[in-house]
Image (cartoon, helix red, strand yellow):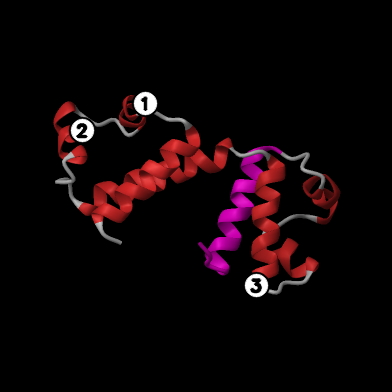
Amino acid sequence: MSVDELFMKIKDYQDKLKLPDDYLFNIVEFTPAEVAEYNQKKAAPGIYESVLKQIQRLYLLSLTPAELLAKLRAIKASAHLSEAAWLKGMAVSEVDVADFLAGKKPTMVYVTALNALKAKYPVE
């Protein structure tokens, strides 16, 4: 992905999160010089990749369990997984299935499950 594409994806996540530049740069701990390089699109591509990864994590943590379950179910459908294979792929134990499917688990449980499925069944 080019720097311009990475920059636009970051801006898209900022819009979704209503996250101003000042807050973003605080989160990623940029110095004023790094902020200037970043905004001029003169920073190394790895910088933009790192910022994108961090803002994607922040975005996922901002979602509700119901929203994350919808993403998980979309992967299930696109990968043509059975319910059992889907739950196994996310390491959901039998005792947790009902609460998991009802959206009663902490957000991080669903983010972890999403990351596990994305690792096995890459989607975008």
Drawn side of residue 16 relative to residue 113, left or right: left
Q: How many marks?
A: 3
Judging by the rendered image, the residue that carries numbered circle 3 is: 79
Tell me: residue 3, above or below residue 54: below
Q: From the image, tell me which residue sits under label 1.
A: 23
**Residue on which the image places disc 2:** 35
Residue at image location 55% in from the left, 43% down from the top: 60
Whether 116 is among the magenta residues is: yes
At 32% from the left and 52% from the top, the residue drawn is 6
Magenta: main secondary structure equals helix
Task: Please name the amino acid that badge 1 sits on.
Answer: Tyr
Question: What span is in magenta?
Answer: 106-124
Residue 119, given in percent of the width and then of the height, sits at 53, 64
Residue 20: give x, y in percent of width and height. Answer: 37, 28
* Residues at marks 1 and 2, CA–CA distance in whole angstroms: 12 Å
Residue found at x 22% / y 53% = 45
